[in-house]
Amino acid sequence: MKLSTYNFLTSMAIKGVKVGYPLKLTISKKDVVESEFNPVFIERLLPKLDWSAVYGAAQVAELAEDIPATQPENISDDEQLLQRLHHLLFEIDVLEGQMECPETGRIFPITDGIPNMLLNEDEV
Amino acid sequence: MTKQLTTTTATNAASSITQTSNLAPTVISPTSAYATTATTTTTTTEAVAPATSETTTKAQPITKAATTTTTTSASSDASGRSAALERAYVHDVYEHCEEPTGPVRPRVAQFLGNLEPGSVVCDVGCGSGRYLTQCNPAICTIGVDRCYRLGKVAHEKGGEVALCDNLELPFRDDSFDAVLSLAVVHHFATTERRVRALRELARILRIGGRVVITVWALEQRHRRFESQDVLIPWQPPKNRTFSYSDEDDDDDFLPPYHAYTEDSTNSSRSAGDGDSSSLSSSSPGESCYSFVRRAIQKLAGGRRHAWFLDSWTSKDTKNDSSLDYEDAKDLPIELRRLEDFDEFPDPPLSAGLKSRSLGSILQPPPRQIVRSRSSVPSLGGPLLPGETKASAAAALLLSAPEVQLQLNGRHSPTATVSAGSTLNRRPKLIKQKQSLCDEDDSLAQSSDPTNSSAFQMVSSYNSSNGGVSSSLYTRTGCYASSFHQHASATATPPTEPGELTGAPAATMPSFLRKQSSLNEDLMAGNRLREKEGVRKRIQKQTSLNEAFLCRSAMFSKRLQIIREGFTSKIKSSTGSLERVTKTGISKLIQNIKPSPTPPSNPNPQQTNNNNKQGTTLTNQTHPHAHPHQHHHHHHLGSNASGLFPAHLLLSSTSSTGPVSYCSNVDCSAANICHCSAYQQECAACADSEQGNARRHSRESGSDSSKDSSLQSDTSIESEDSFASVIFIPKPEQAQQQLNYQQQHQHSNSSSSNSSSGNGAALAAAAGANQNTTTLIATPGARLPHTHTHTHTHSVPTSPLVMPCPPTPAHSPAANQGTVTSPPQSMAAVTAAMAILTPAAKPERFSFDAAHIKQQQELQLEQTTSTIRQITRQAIREMPAIPKFRKQQSLQLQRQSFPIVRRASGSAAASSGSSSIGTRLLSLELFNPATDDLDSDSSEPSSPDSIDSVISAPRSAQLLSAPGTGTGKSSDESDSALAQQISINQQQYHKGELQINNGTPNANDIILNADSAPLLPDKRDTSQTKAQQLPHDCAEFAEQLTAQLQRELEDKSNRADCRSLDGIGDIGEFLSGGSKKRSNGDLSALRDELRERRLMLANLSTQPSLQHSPMSSSTSSLSSQTRSFTIHEEQEGEEEEDEENERSYTLGIYEHCKISKFKYKRNRHYNLNPETAYLLQDDGDSDVRDDEDPIPEEDEDAEALEARGGDQLGEGMHEYGQRRRNFSAIKSVTSSASSSTETAPSPSSQQQQQRQPLQQRTSTESLEHSNSSTTSLDSPSQGGGATTHHRYYHVFREGELDALINHHVTSLHIVSSYYERASWCVVAEKVQVWTI
């Protein structure tokens, strides 16, 4: 699971959970996969991302020093930051870990890089 | 209950067992709430649960929710059902089926390519991730799918994948620029869910974002769907070309259905046919489809919620033309709602999941049952449904194993339903009911929660042990009942309680093991138990039983004599039989009414015995007399000849019981377990019946309504209940009651026998079964319930009896007893379902008024054999009897005749000389017949008794068809039949064992179960014989065997001319034998018996063939319902026959045929067709009937062969060839039978009868029957590799657009187009302002 995906995941589908975001990520095993850097792509993508979740992911990924806690104003001008964001969002693949619902503590395991967001019937 | 459903593979069974165990607790509760609906829902949920558990975690919660919701609200049920369906037919399928990666949809690729860089796309249902990485490198794509396997594939391709459900997308709102939903929405089973899915797609889509939705189109160039809700078979990965990708429904793809020719000639399904059409499809593969369809229907149809409404509405609009499908497997399955949804268990789910057979099997029986209900209005409207359900369930259970759980699935659910119904409706039923309820509960707990699981369990057991599964179910029920009974009234706790307690119902495997151990214990302790039971109940009988045991040889001789007498009587007294039967029935009814004072505990048995004997003497006071007779027979053996048969049977069972048990044990531990279970059940039943039954019956009877009282009576004490019950019925009801009474008597006799002879286990079980049956019968209106109860009880006994067959030659009496008893149980089982009708049919055949007798006989048979097993056995036996009667030439008939003769001989010997012989006869289902005969018979008491016996044999074995023949002949015929049956059973057991080992076919399982029950019966009979006719028993047995052998020889010789000539000859033999017997020419009879014995011995060498039919009959437990319908039809035919004097003889033959048909039906649906043919061809019935039985036998033999019993198969082949020869003569009938076998399915037995005619053309009756049974029972058998089906809701043009426009306001359709067999919609999310 790329951290870009993590940015979109919520547990709001769980019954009683209103926001369910961001999920508390725990990475037990990760891999770094190189991918082509496209600054335009990152720039266009950033508005769709939740920066707090991005920063949280950076913290979990031990890259917090590379990512500011708050989204800078003119990020499009900071190619380095875009590079770092690219690395954070698209080159770190979480192979094993889990995500925890902030409201219910429901654990969503990540196995083989695939988060299992399936819910049981009684959880919906 | 659901034992008979065992057709699934061992693996499935194992899984099912585990599932059942897990689910059991939950299931129980639903039964209480709504017997029918709740059970169905629970069954569905259960079925679903296993599948879900296997695949995903959701399954469990869903199942729970379903279980909880089912009782509460229909809507919840529907949602649960739809979810289960999706889980079973979408999620699981994708999880297990590899789909080819098709080409990328150009329009979709274009859509993705046109997205702005940095767009975030969510591909919902990404599958293998086709669109995740290729189309546009400048976009961020997240694929989600519910299938872990596909998700992994997509992840390996470099895609970002998450597992989630389209209904609960784990994404923030308004977060995606584009969403793809390709070939996903059509997998949702209901409009509600489709809308939810669409709304979820819209939720994650940002304002202005676009979503691409594609769904399969109803309108396709190469595929045509007659329904919008279809199950599309998933071709194995190997055939990827043919399989479609879920996401890509492209025409370009090698369409799985590309073969569809536009020709509509061979359309397997007609749009208008509805369920029947789908089921009736000629292609062998359709069975699976039928299962799936049924399952789906059940799932969806529970309460007609919205989910299939679309399909329903749209069905008629477009799919008038049927397409020819090259491969049946490729045919999509249409999903249609079933109105009978409640009645149908959930097996479909399980079947759909992976075990297919049971569900389909189960489902049809209910319908049949329903029909039977209609046919038997007298029984009591309200009660009937429950009873019918129970009976159906039992039948289903019985059939399931063979059908591969066809019966199991259905049976289990039905059983649960019945149990629930019984509980709900008859909460007051005393111990019997409790026992039943307990059984149900136990089943429910263990298996009920998951009827499917129970079925699966059954199937597994069947597969492993064949009969064991059925026995287990019965055992569980019996155990539960026995436990309860023991707890309530520990009349005969000696070994039974321990055994029963030892094997808790919840743990089926443990039961088996325990049962096996218990069986051994029972074997060893049978004598002690018998003694104790006899002392308690009938002190005198104990001595007699022991004597019988020691003097089995004498019994055999007597039986032979009786057989001879039967033959002679049959020949001479066909006409007289009719009169006698009619008069006897009326007399019986009258007697029953006047003699409401059922004897005390011992008295009931005595009355039963008397009834049996009473055929001659106590026709008027049959009810009382019967119970007394039974008791006397068991204890004293002085009861009328009618009683003797049963006693003889019991004695034979008791005597041969050990052997049978041994054989069972040898054959397979599972069998042993079954046997032991049966024994235990029997013992428990007997104990409860004897001890508690009486008390309970009285108490419950008083407390609960008539039905409850009757049931309770039956359950508690057959004797008491018999008396009371018997009196209750009115003329028609009285007939039914008589039948029931007869059954009760039989059961009582068996119980008494069991108590006396086997004492604890076997005898008790048999007795319990019989008692239950009798009790049930008495309620009349509540008969169904009682039948069900009796069925359950009887089933175990029958299995016990079955084991006995192996030793028929050695201990003809015992074999006969066992054989006869199983038929009784079978009859009872069938009676429960269609008992009334069948009974009426036999009555018609034998006697116009004989309906009661027939029913009684049937009931008795059914009662004797435990419900499922009994049903099977009974069915087998029944057909055999008809065959014997009609065509004695047929091996089965021959066998059956010998058995009957033996039994009758013993009875006749006892009765002729004393009442012992009659008692024995009476015990073997003959009691009712004897009663009827007695009442009707103008001949002396002994002949009357014989007649009565004969009548019973007719229904059961038909050997006695000559009915008019002296009691000896009938007795002999009975004994012979019993022996034959026993032999057959043995053979079957062998075959079953083999089969079980090789193939866990339901039939095999059933057979095993039958064999197991038979053993107990045999033991019982042997015990009873020993008690009553210790000395004579051996003689009778010998005589019977000799006669049987002779008959067999005659039959073989006459095989060519069996049709009419054979029947006439048989009748002559019977009549001659009866005359001889009456004249005291026992020596001649003995000679004949000896010859017969020799023949039997020879046959025993070829047991497989003969037995095979039995096994087939047993296997087709589900066919019981069919048999019922057949019986009804047959009854009609019989009635016609009755009109003519010959009609009596013919009727007898027809009865035999009917019974055969029943057996056939039970075995395979083929029997039904035969019956249908017979019914249709009443005028030609004689020859045709003869022919019919032959084909049936052939089918059976074929089935046996197919089953894999090589040895048996050989013998079966021989028999089958002979039968085929005969059948060739009357190819129509045989074809009909075959067709019936093939068509047994589902829809309606009556319809099946008609269908059989059409299907008659099918020459490969055996194959069809086997295939049908196998396919129905266990898809695994037929197909080997399971075919996965995917559920599709194919969208009509504009349907998706309308769905979006009406239900998803935030989406605005940008474009809608048709591409690659799919409707594609591109919609844009718009801001919706809500004021």
Image (cartoon, rainbow, N blue to C red):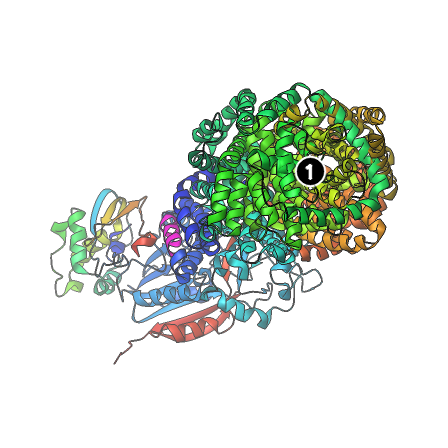
Residue B784 point in image, percent of width and height: 57, 50
**Is B879 placed left or right of A6 in the picture?**
right
Circle count: 1
Q: Is residue A18 shown to the viewer in this render?
A: yes
Figure quadrant of the C terminus of chain B: bottom left
**Is B21 placed left or right of B910 in the picture?**
left
Residue that extends furthest to the bottom in the rendered view of this protein: B1331
Residue B900 lies within the magenta run = no
Quadrant of the rendered image containing residue B221: bottom right
Residue that extends furthest to the top in the rendered view of this protein: B550
* Prevailing secondary structure class for the magenta stretch in the rendered image: helix
Residue B5 point in image, percent of width and height: 56, 43
Instruction: Residue under label 1, please give it.
Output: B612
Residue B234 point in image, percent of width and height: 54, 51
Quadrant of the rendered image containing residue B1035: top right
Out of B415 and B536, give the one closest to the viewer. Answer: B536
Q: Residues within 10 Å of mark 1 (few under 14, many from 20)?
A: many
Check disc 1 and report its element: helix, strand or loop: helix
**Is B1205 placed left or right of A43 in the picture?**
right
Q: Chain of mark 1?
A: B
Q: Is residue B985 shown to the viewer in this render?
A: no
**Is B1016 placed left or right of B703 in the picture?**
right
Out of A114 and B957, give the one closest to the viewer. Answer: B957
Out of B443 and A39, give the one closest to the viewer. Answer: B443
User: Which three-letter amino acid code belongs to the residue tagged 1?
Assistant: Lys
Residue B66 lies within the magenta run = yes
Quadrant of the rendered image containing residue B165: bottom left
Residue B18 point in image, percent of width and height: 43, 38
Out of B427 and B1323, give the one closest to the viewer. Answer: B427
Highlighted magenta segment, given as a residue range: B58-69
Please tell me whether residue B815 is drawn above or below residue B738 in the rendered image. Answer: above
